[in-house]
Structure formats: structure tokens, C-alpha cells
Image: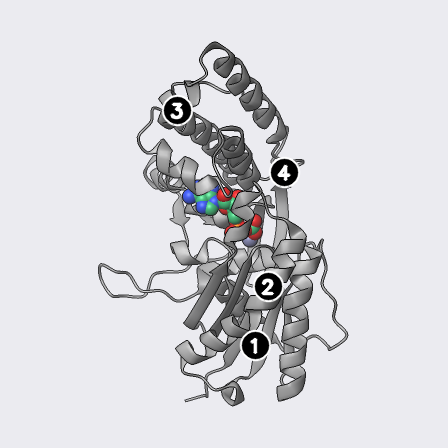
């Protein structure tokens, strides 16, 4: 039997410091240190994020190796997020990965964060019910990647061949969740809180307008503005409007965001003739979105793939699986590599 390939992966593109160890497609450890500091500011403060990465990166990488039971001398490569992301945050992870690889004489693998969100689907996981390995999507498939910074419909042709066929022209879906939460006075990141309160509410309570975007592109900035005016006007009539109607407001805004995403995916499936549909990125943790897509299995015969919760939001295991496929191709980078705040698929 061939020796398995062990890769240490580093993710530091935004406000999560993460390190993971993967052995072929099996994740041995996936350590994520979230930065609570940003909740006091209503959004990620880049300078504070890079300082926190600087403090956490060594303990997080150390813990990932210990939990995996792998010594650094058993590693075959170091993978890291090159971009897209916050420059100061990326710099910490890239510098750490380069120094670590140089010290150990290991090859370096650069990973595109958005490609990694898609490839999270190929991490081997077992069904809690049957104990069997969960199936992975077959090529070609469509992936809706929805995070705090991106909203993309990706045509996935192979592990490393992807094409963006639709994307947001302004805010990302995660931003729409977070900004709506902020308008309601909820702390950052508000997406998970809207999800939580929405469970108790009626999604049809408050209708919000749908953007008229042609083709497969998205726009969320108009929804944010109409939500802002809606809350402002309702509060002018009743100061306690939000407190009294929190669940219904959350359910209604969540329903609207999910519907916008779902309608475009229906269109993408119809135009490409592909009905293997995957979700990726932090917003794919949203229960309304998951349920809406799972319902399409029955309604439209879609074959729907949703990653395990821990691989939806930012994590290094997805960087590790991307690193694995690039390792197989011998796709390495050099010590001269620098981070990229913007990076196409
Ligand atoms: O992929 P991710 O962890 O980071 C980026 O690359 O941006 O995504 C973070 C985004 C945030 O906007 C957060 O509010 C959103 O994902 N999010 C959710 C949920 N969990 C995370 N949005 C709605 N419902 C959730 N359950
Ligand atoms: Zn992300």
C-alpha cells in the first residue's frame, strides 16, 4: 500500500485562525480559534484581526499537530490560504506557512479560499446513522458558495477546474444577514442569530422586495436599504417593534434571502441542465437555506450536497483537502509567494 500523504493546512483569511492536518482525504484535526473581539464593533476590524492571528497561529498549529498525533517530521507539505481575504490577516498565515516549510524543507501549496469552500465536499465523512462514508458530488456539479464576503454560483468541472457563472454585484449573502442583524441591534456576526430567532417566527409576516437582476447574478444592497427603512419606520410608530416581533422579522428577512438564492439556483440548474447541486460557505450553515435546498430533492429531483457544519464556516480542513488535490498534481508554489486580497477562481 502507498504511504498516505500528510498535509498541515493554515487558514487566516478573515477572523478565524485555523490549522488542520489531513491524511489523504481524512481530516485528523481541524482547530478553529474564533475572534470574539469583533462582536463589540459590529463587523471585522482588519487591524484587530491580524493582531489576533499573530497571537493564535502558533498555538493553533501546535494543537492541530498534537490532536492529529502527527509529528512535524511526518508532514509531506504545508498548504495555506493565499487569498482572497484581508491582507493583514492573510499575511500572518502566509508568513507562518512559508517559515514552517522553509525550516522543515517541505513543499508549499497555495490555496484559493473560495475553491477550498467548494472542495470541502470531498472531505471524507461518515453518516452518523449508518456509519458508512457519505457520498461526494459527481462532476460536473453546481455549487452555491455563500459567505460573508462572497456569493457565487460555481460550475465545478473537476477538483481543480471551476468557473464562476453568477455572482453578487454588491453585498454578499452573509453580509445581507449580518447587516440586517446589525440594523436590529444584534451583535456580529448576526447570521447565526437571525437563523436562531427565525425558527420561532412566521416567514410571511413582512414581505420584502426581490431584486430584479438579469441572468445568474445577485444583488443584496437594495434589500438591505429597504430593510433599514422598514425598521426605521416601524420603530417610529412603536419603539419596541423589534423586541415584540423579533422572530417574525428574522423569519421574513431570512426567507427573502433564501428565496433570492434559491431562485437563481433554479435558473442555473435549468440553463446548464445540471441537477447535482451543492452548498458551501458560512451561510450554508443556515437552516432555512439547507431546508429549502433539501426540499428541492423531492420537488425538482435535485441531488443536493451540504457539507457538515464544521466545514461550512471558515476552517483549515477545507484548505487541507484543496492542498491534497494540488499535491497529487504536483502543483507547488515557491518561497516568493505573497498573499492576494483579491483572487479569482
Ligand atoms: O465562510 P465564512 O465563515 O467566512 C467568510 O469567508 O466570509 O462565512 C461567514 C458568514 C457570516 O456572514 C455569517 O453571518 C454567516 O456566514 N453565517 C450564517 C450562519 N452561520 C454563519 N448566516 C446565516 N445563518 C447561519 N446559520
Ligand atoms: Zn469563507
How far is disc 4 from disc 3 in space, using C-alphas? 31 Å
Q: Which secondary structure, mark 4?
A: loop
Foreground tag (2 vs 4) = 2
Q: Mark 2 or mark 4: which comes first in sequence?
A: 2
Q: Residue furthest left?
A: 129
How far is disc 2 from disc 3 in space, using C-alphas? 36 Å
How far is disc 3 from disc 1 in space, using C-alphas? 54 Å
Q: Which residue is mark 3?
A: 243
Using residue 108 as the reference point, say whether residue 174 is left or right of it: left
Other-residue count near label 2 (Cα within 10 Å), few / some / many at <14 / 14–19 / ≥20: many
Foreground tag (1 vs 2) = 2
Q: Cβ of disc 3 within 8 Å of ligand 1?
A: no
Other-residue count near label 1 (Cα within 10 Å), few / some / many at <14 / 14–19 / ≥20: few
Would you place residue 256 above or below residue 77 in this image?
Answer: above
Q: Mark 4 or mark 3: which comes first in sequence?
A: 4
Q: Mark 1 or mark 2: which comes first in sequence?
A: 2
Q: Position of residue 317 (x, y in %)?
A: 48, 66
Q: Mark 1 or mark 4: which comes first in sequence?
A: 4
Other-residue count near label 4 (Cα within 10 Å), few / some / many at <14 / 14–19 / ≥20: many
Seen at 52% across and 85% down, the residue is: 72
Q: Which residue is mark 4?
A: 168
How far is disc 2 from disc 4 in space, using C-alphas? 28 Å
Seen at 40% across and 47% down, the residue is: 304
Q: Which residue is mark 2?
A: 53
Seen at 50% across and 88% down, the residue is: 74
Foreground tag (1 vs 4) = 4
Q: Position of residue 25 (x, y in %)?
A: 44, 72
Residue closest to the eye, 154 or 186? 186
Amino acid at each position: 500500500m502507498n504511504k498516505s500523504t500528510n498535509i498541515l493546512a493554515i487558514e487566516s483569511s478573515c477572523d478565524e485562525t485555523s490549522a488542520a492536518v489531513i491524511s489523504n482525504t481524512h481530516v485528523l484535526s481541524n482547530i478553529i480559534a474564533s475572534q470574539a473581539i469583533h462582536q463589540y464593533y459590529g463587523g471585522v476590524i482588519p487591524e484587530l484581526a491580524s493582531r489576533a492571528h499573530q497571537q493564535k497561529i502558533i498555538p493553533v498549529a501546535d494543537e492541530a499537530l498534537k490532536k492529529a498525533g502527527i509529528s512535524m517530521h511526518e508532514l509531506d507539505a504545508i498548504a495555506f490560504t493565499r487569498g482572497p481575504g484581508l491582507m493583514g490577516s492573510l499575511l500572518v498565515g502566509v508568513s507562518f506557512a512559508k517559515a514552517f516549510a522553509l525550516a522543515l524543507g517541505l513543499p508549499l501549496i497555495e490555496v484559493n479560499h473560495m475553491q477550498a469552500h467548494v472542495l470541502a465536499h470531498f472531505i471524507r465523512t461518515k453518516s452518523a446513522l449508518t456509519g458508512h462514508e457519505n457520498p461526494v458530488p459527481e462532476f460536473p456539479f453546481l455549487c452555491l458558495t455563500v459567505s460573508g464576503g462572497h456569493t457565487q454560483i460555481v460550475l465545478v468541472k473537476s477538483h481543480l477546474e471551476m468557473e464562476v457563472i453568477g455572482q453578487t454585484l454588491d453585498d454578499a449573502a452573509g453580509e445581507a444577514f449580518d447587516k440586517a442583524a446589525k440594523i436590529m441591534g444584534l451583535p456580529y456576526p448576526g447570521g447565526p442569530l437571525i437563523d436562531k430567532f427565525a425558527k420561532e417566527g412566521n416567514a410571511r409576516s413582512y414581505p420584502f422586495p426581490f431584486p430584479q437582476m438579469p441572468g445568474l447574478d445577485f444583488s443584496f444592497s437594495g434589500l438591505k436599504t429597504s430593510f433599514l427603512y422598514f425598521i426605521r419606520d416601524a420603530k417610529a410608530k412603536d419603539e419596541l417593534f423589534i423586541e415584540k416581533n423579533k422572530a417574525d422579522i428574522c423569519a421574513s428577512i431570512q426567507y427573502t434571502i433564501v428565496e433570492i438564492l434559491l431562485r437563481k439556483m433554479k435558473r442555473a440548474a435549468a440553463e446548464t441542465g445540471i441537477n447535482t447541486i451543492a452548498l458551501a460557505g458560512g451561510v450554508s450553515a443556515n437552516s432555512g437555506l439547507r431546508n429549502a435546498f433539501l426540499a428541492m430533492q423531492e420537488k425538482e429531483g435535485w441531488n443536493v450536497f451540504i457539507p457538515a457544519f464544521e466545514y461550512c464556516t471558515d476552517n483549515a480542513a477545507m484548505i487541507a483537502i484543496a492542498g491534497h488535490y494540488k499535491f497529487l498534481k504536483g502543483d507547488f508554489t515557491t518561497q516568493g509567494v505573497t498573499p492576494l486580497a483579491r483572487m479569482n477562481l
